[in-house]
Image (tube, grey):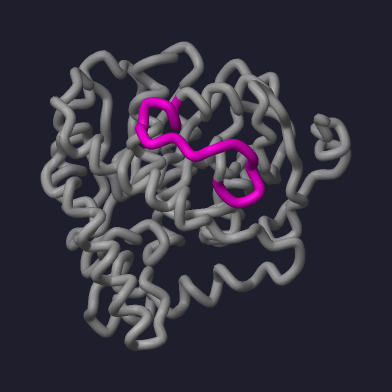
Amino acid sequence: MNNRQEARDDVVKSYQNAPTRTVSDGGVNFAYRELGPKTGVPVVFLTHLAAVLDNWDPRVVDGIASKHRVITFDNRGVGASTGSTPNTIQAMAKDAITFIRALGLTEVDLLGFSMGGMIAQVVAQDEPQLVRKLILAGTGPAGGEGITNVTRISHLDTIRGLLTLQDPKQFLFFTRTPNGRRAGKEFLARLKERTHNRDKAISLKSYGAQLGAIHRWGLEQPSDLSVVRRPVLVANGESDKMVPTTNSVDLAGRLPDSELVIYPDAGHGGIFQFHGQFVEKALEFLAR
């Protein structure tokens, strides 16, 4: 069943209040939320390892949605979306394309964070006519430096989180400096602002499939990014331990029309730590 019409009757201004909808295609029910204006090119958010709808920073979502229609969704087999989770980035990109087309969209901007940025690169290469602009944050190219270490780092910091009774994202996304620790706590508090109709956490099986997909991406031969002839904003923190920041520099250097922003004293979650500056930059980039 497609409840898109109902979703568009009222403009939703806050991610906290955005209803969770579903759209079906290819035997999969994709769960999604949308907010912001109803006109213009929508910005589709592509999410990170283990993330569900509730893992997007509401300051980033609401900030972009102040000027653009924003759509977030659960990947196949994750959260409230049905089906089984693919174990390659390429298959996830096909799912993203299926989802976008199921909503009847013919042109979108993509904001991909971490694993989502990998998916966004494949979408832009496979379906260039579908993509107007790209924002790639905390991510890297196929075969990028250190990407095969994501599984090990994730496992170590998950254990570290359990031992210290903290969310692993405090270690994975943020630096251990006073600024980083504070930013991590503030980010994790923002993720809890929505109290009703929350999404369900990823299953261990789906998490394993995603780790496998990222590992394969890290083992791939570098692809020809000069074919991505769309404007791209590349952003990261200067000390990303999950997808080393050198990958952001590499991406920006290999994309023909790119701009690079690196946030100081910030890690993988730099766009969340510097959400105010990031939103301002993203809005300026999308408006050009």
Total marks placed = 0
Q: In this orientation, which residue lies closer to the viewer: 250 or 76? A: 76
Q: Quadrant of the N terminus?
A: top right
> Quick check: is 91 in the magenta stretch?
yes
> Quick check: is 268 in the magenta stretch?
no
Q: In this orientation, which residue lies closer to the viewer: 57 or 2? A: 2
Q: In this orientation, which residue lies closer to the viewer: 141 or 253? A: 141
View extreme (bottom): residue: 164
Q: Is residue 182 placed above or below 214 in the rendered structure?
A: below
Q: Position of residue 137 (x, y in %)?
A: 34, 46
Q: Specify the quadrant of the image occupied by residue 126.
A: top left
Q: Residue at (11%, 44%) from the top-left corner? A: 145
Q: Residue at (38%, 66%) from the top-left corner? A: 273
Residue 240 appears anywhere in the view: no
Q: Position of residue 182 (x, y in %)?
A: 37, 82
Q: Is residue 243 placed above or below 57 in the rendered structure?
A: above
Q: Residue at (33%, 31%) from the top-left corner? A: 232
Residue 213 appears anywhere in the view: yes
- Most common secondary structure along the magenta stretch: loop
Left or right: 9 with respect to 83? Answer: right
Q: In this orientation, which residue lies closer to the viewer: 55 or 232? A: 55
Left or right: 168 with respect to 97? Answer: left
View extreme (front): residue: 205
Q: Position of residue 32 (x, y in %)?
A: 67, 42
- Range of magenta residues: 78-93
Q: Specify the quadrant of the image occupied by residue 122.
A: top left
